[in-house]
């Protein structure tokens, strides 16, 4: 069993940062395990969601931000819906992802690259361009075989456009991203 | 149902591509039910899940631009078929009730986001404003004897504080609509369980496991098809059904319909308008079981 010496590794700033950004009181979690019981992703997690809650309480920044679970969580809202203490656990998982990006953790690079490719597409065209998104994702990850088995199923249906659906106001959308990035600097 | 109700309409990006049959059938069904859709002019992407996993203010700003468009067009309610768009638009509205959050969002926008635009799903409007009873009266091609598994996906009704529609654990609005069409709705205990969401591309095993479980239950309950209200759920279950079968050593050929497609067929709309040809798993055997329109049969 792994033992964590809390007196040595407790990071109060981390707890405060998570609480402020998520607007949640993490101390309310009494480890009932309801979130983990309902979480469909536990099988793919390295740390179950209730244990992430406990590690946040214990100020274990490194352990939490370097885990895979925060990238696998798909924000399905089971945990939030079922928490008996009304903690918005899904929002907290979102915030942990935000922080993992900020502090340069990247435990599941494929997920991060997919997210980035998606947003780049929106920034550029104003709407997501599915075909372009896939091409960008495959190029960045080198996973050229991703979903190639689906091509014969999807292409004859005429569902995927080879051209982006550009909107008139794409500059307005690009400006939203621009201002956001300026603030991050 | 005397006069048409008018709503701002936000189709969402997938409606232009992978879920074009949902988009098409939604428009056809709304028209048939007296719901007038006014598409938001030059709407942009809500950012979907990627935006909120990166930053909540950025995500709300992407929704804010679209809410502003609705306001400038004089529309007080925006409706959308897509649960992901729905959750982003609603969560943005909900969080912007906090003035501090709102001011951060406004700093990213050309003009401040409006406060008074309501957001609902198309399902909510069909269920609440038209209702199963009025729908039943309009059915010309009942889905008699079709055993269907209703699958809502995780986002349509959760979390309840934000979504404010139906039950977060056991929603029944789509069940009631399908029953009004004459279908048999099978008990389906995984109505709000996640399908694996957008992990199909980055973490495929997650989708084949979770969506596989959804198909397993639909089969165990003897459903002939599943009925969804979400473009991503539909894509995972339909387009990826072959991947699911290979991963789980199953051999399912379960058609995955949008509820609007079945609503449309029961209302007697032409099958062409409902986009059945866009589905990956062949729906013909199930569609064949639906009788011809009653006026034609008599």
Image (tube, helix red, strand yellow):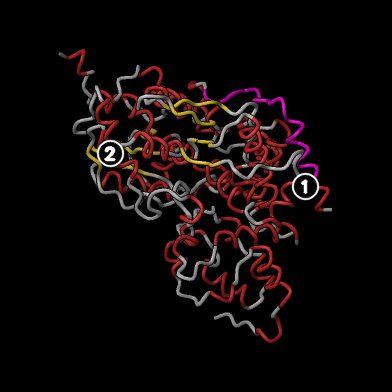
Q: Residue furthest bottom?
A: A7
Q: Which chain is mark 1 on?
A: B
How packed is label 1: few (under 14 Cα within 10 Å), some, or many (20 or more)? some
Is residue B275 shown to the viewer in this render? Answer: no
Q: CA distance from mark 1 to mark 2?
A: 47 Å
Give the residue number, with chain letter if any, for mark 2. B148
Q: Secondary structure at mark 2?
A: strand
Q: Quadrant of the N terminus of chain A?
A: bottom right
Is residue B37 shown to the viewer in this render? Answer: yes
How packed is label 2: few (under 14 Cα within 10 Å), some, or many (20 or more)? many
Query: Viewed as shown, does residue B96 lie left or right of B110?
Result: left
Labels 1 and 2: the sequence-earlier one: 1
Query: Viewed as shown, does residue B115 lie left or right of B291?
Result: right
Q: Residue drawn 77% across and 31% down?
A: A171
* Marks 1, 2: nearer the viewer: 1
Q: Secondary structure at mark 1?
A: loop
Residues drawn in magenta:
A159-179
Q: Residue drawn 65% across and 22% down?
A: A163
Q: Say the numbered circle drawn on residue B212.
A: none
Q: Residue furthest left?
A: B298
Question: Between residues A36 and B107, which one lies in front from this camera angle?
Answer: B107
Question: Between residues B121 and B191, which one lies in front from this camera angle?
Answer: B121
Whether A14 is drawn above or below A153: the answer is below
Residue B96: percent from the left, percent from the top?
64, 51
Give the residue number, with chain letter if any, for mark 1. B107
Residue A10: percent from the left, percent from the top?
69, 80
Residue B78: percent from the left, percent from the top?
54, 36
Residue B56: percent from the left, percent from the top?
66, 52
């Amino acid at each position: 069993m792994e033992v964590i010496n809390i007196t040595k590794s407790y990071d109060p700033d981390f707890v405060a940062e998570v609480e402020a950004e998520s607007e949640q009181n993490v101390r309310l979690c009494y480890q009932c395990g309801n979130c983990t019981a309902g979480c469909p992703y536990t099988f793919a997690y390295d740390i179950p969601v209730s244990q992430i809650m406990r590690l946040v309480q214990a100020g274990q920044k490194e352990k939490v931000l370097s885990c895979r679970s925060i990238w696998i969580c798909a924000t399905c809202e089971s945990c939030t819906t079922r928490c008996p203490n009304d903690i918005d656990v899904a929002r907290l998982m979102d915030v942990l992802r935000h922080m993992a990006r900020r502090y340069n953790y990247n435990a599941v690079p494929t997920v991060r690259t997919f997210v980035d490719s998606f947003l780049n597409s929106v920034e550029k065209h104003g709407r997501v361009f599915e075909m372009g998104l896939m091409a960008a994702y495959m190029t960045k990850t080198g996973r050229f075989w991703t979903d190639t088995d689906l091509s014969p199923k999807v292409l004859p249906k005429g569902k995927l456009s080879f051209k982006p659906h550009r909107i008139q106001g794409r500059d307005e959308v690009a400006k939203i991203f621009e201002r956001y990035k300026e603030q991050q600097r | 149902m005397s006069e048409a109700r008018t709503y701002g309409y936000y189709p969402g990006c997938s409606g232009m591509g992978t879920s074009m049959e949902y988009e098409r059938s939604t428009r056809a069904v709304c028209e048939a039910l007296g719901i007038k859709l006014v598409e938001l002019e030059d709407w942009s992407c809500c950012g979907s899940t990627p935006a909120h996993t990166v930053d909540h203010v950025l995500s709300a700003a992407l929704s804010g631009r679209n809410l502003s468009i609705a306001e400038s067009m004089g529309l007080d309610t925006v409706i959308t078929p897509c649960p992901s768009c729905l959750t982003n638009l609603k969560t943005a509205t909900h969080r912007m009730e906090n003035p501090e959050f709102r001011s951060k969002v406004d700093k990213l926008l050309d003009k401040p986001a409006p406060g008074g635009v309501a957001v609902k799903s198309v399902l909510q409007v069909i269920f609440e404003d038209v209702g199963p009873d009025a729908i039943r009266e309009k059915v010309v091609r009942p889905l008699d004897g079709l055993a269907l598994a209703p699958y809502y996906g995780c986002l349509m009704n959760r979390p309840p504080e934000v979504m404010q529609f139906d039950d977060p654990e056991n929603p029944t609005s789509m069940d009631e609509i399908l029953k009004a069409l004459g279908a048999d709705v099978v008990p389906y205990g995984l109505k709000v369980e996640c399908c694996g969401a957008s992990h199909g591309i980055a973490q495929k095993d997650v989708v084949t496991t979770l969506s596989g479980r959804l198909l397993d239950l639909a089969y165990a309950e003897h459903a002939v098809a599943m009925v969804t209200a979400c473009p991503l759920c539909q894509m995972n279950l339909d387009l990826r059904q072959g991947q699911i079968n290979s991963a789980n050593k199953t051999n399912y050929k379960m058609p995955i319909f949008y509820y609007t497609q079945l609503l449309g067929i029961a209302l007697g709309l032409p099958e062409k308008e409902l986009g059945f040809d866009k589905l990956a798993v062949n729906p013909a055997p199930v569609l064949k079981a639906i009788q011809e329109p009653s006026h034609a049969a008599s």
